[in-house]
Image (tube, helix red, strand yellow):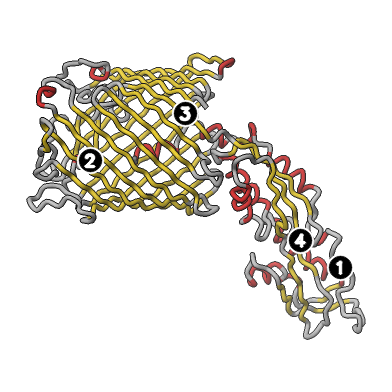
Amino acid sequence: MLTSNLSSKLSLNQFLRVNLSASFFLAIVLYLCLLGLKPLNAQTPINHKTTIASDQQIPRQIVVKKFDVVGSTIFSQSELNQTVKSYLKRPLTLPELFQARSTITKLYTDQGYVSSGAYIPPQKLNDGTVQITVLEGKLEEIKVVGTKRLSTDYISARIETAGKPLNVNSLLSALQLLRLDPLIDNVSAELSAGIRPGTNLLEITIKEADAFNVSTNFNNSRSPSVGTNQRSIGINHGNLLGFGDHFNWEYANTKGSNGFDLAYGFPVNSKNGTIKAVVGGNSNHVIEDPFTAIEIESKSRYYELSLRQPILLKPTQEFALGVSLTRSESETFLMNDKFFLSRGANEEGEARISAVRLFQEFIKRNEQEVFALRSQFSLGVDAFNSTINNNGEPDSTFVSWRGQSQWTRRLDEDFLLLLRGDIQLSEGSLVPLEQFRIGGVNSIRGYRQDLSLGDNGLFVSTELRIPILRFRKFDGLLQVVPFFDLGTVWNSDDVEIAHATLPALGVGLNLAMGDRFNARLDWGIPLTSIETDKNSLQEAGIYFSVNSNFF
């Protein structure tokens, strides 16, 4: 789950979605509208033509000892006082008094509050104090058109924060975030002045993206013990009930295994906070000789409930905090009877792990690169009848930390550099479900899947994706992919690991046909000699994956 979370954040399509200038004409439309939207002090609705009370004679000059600026929720009193400081304690003509008011308006417009402004209301000039009133602009109405299944409240809630008071920079940022939303294919906006002073009308036109998808995958990424060739089918809907909730179901099987995942999540606020529930299960039986005769089987189930909340949310940056509650259960069988086989299980081969996990995620992206970090602290707890061993063996009480990073850099058109890193540290021994694994297509290519496991581990990888052939008619691209992988694992106790360090290099081919089809072929060359029967392509260092999206 940890790896998939990071990978989903770092799709190479981020380059396409963050390149707003190519297909995202929002900024042009919005700014063209703003060219006709004058600042408040230049608009016509304010009818206070005389700023001195009618029973007073208008002097040629006045000396202002203090400006009393009221109505501002953005700037502090000290900031406002500093802005008009040069107009204090000297004779001012009436035009100069209006200039003082205009400096307040300029303070707002320079910061993007283009429909906010200041004016001097009718008043008596007492004790050299002049009141300046600020009228902060706001969105009077947000009209959303073009939606089909997606609720208009989903759109307007993500825009409203930019209109209190209205800031054009915040508005552009909010609209750009909508453009990056996977539920939205494109967005344009038109901003116009409202009827009342300081009010504005915003009309947003939305083109929804396809939220429903059926995908299939065929690969050889599973362990040879249950059969390397895996087939899977997935059904995903990103907007199941119309308010941005997402549903995902996936089934996968090999010759010796069957598994499923079921997930449902929904937004809880306009800042993309989400709650997600996951349930899954697997059944495996060993088909690798010479173990077939003793009929080794295992069954496992896992459950997860998580809350994720972005703290910093910008078009080019995101920082989120989250917490998840997880539960995993497994048992092993020998000749159809429960039997102790894995470390940390009880005498009947059962292991029940309950854990609280705190995670932090950071993403920074632009037109040239995407960089992401993920950190997760896991605390195993004695709850819900978890496995607790009093003999020094690992159980449900543990503490570990895992960190992941990925950096993708565009060197030229479709020419990419990809760097990955993964580390896990544990203060004690862990059950196999929690251990760090190396070997296989997602870690060290050139070795069998999950060849080595340890309580602690480190993995680094670098690869280039070099374009060699384009099929523009089909939006197709073929890339050659040289790579180098290195990983090592170690235990927190004195239990030795046979193949603790695994280096490999190799080359691959990656074929993409838009978003509908992707095929990958890798050949990894192990730099550490390990005896293997090589009864499968995977054990010979060859990995393949074919993925199709039908909707």
- Quadrant assignment, res 95: bottom right
Mark 2–mark 4 CB contact (< 8 Å): no
- Label 3: which secondary element: strand
- Mark in the foreground, 1 or 2: 2
Which of the 4 quarters of the picture holds residue 367?
top right
Q: In this view, does 481 lie above or below 86?
A: above
Q: Is residue 474 above or below residue 335?
A: above
Query: Is residue 447 in view from this perspective?
Result: no
The disc label shown at residue 95, or none: 1
In the rendered structure, which disc, 4 or 1, sits on the residue that comes first in sequence?
Answer: 1
Local SS, label 1: helix
What is the distance, in whole Å, between disc 4 and disc 3 at their CAs?
Answer: 48 Å
At label 4, the amino acid type is: Gly
Q: Is residue 479 left or right of residue 69?
A: left
Looking at the image, which residue is at 28% across and 24% down? Answer: 254
Q: What's the amino acid at mark 2?
A: Leu
Q: Mark 3, mark 2: which one is toward the viewer?
A: 3
Tell which tag, 4 or 1, sits nearer the viewer.
4
Q: Where is residue 495 in the image (x, y as percent from the top left)?
A: 10, 40
* Nearer-N-terminus badge (3/2): 3
Please give the residue where the numbered disc 4 appears in the rendered image: 198
The residue singled out by tag 3 in the image is 214
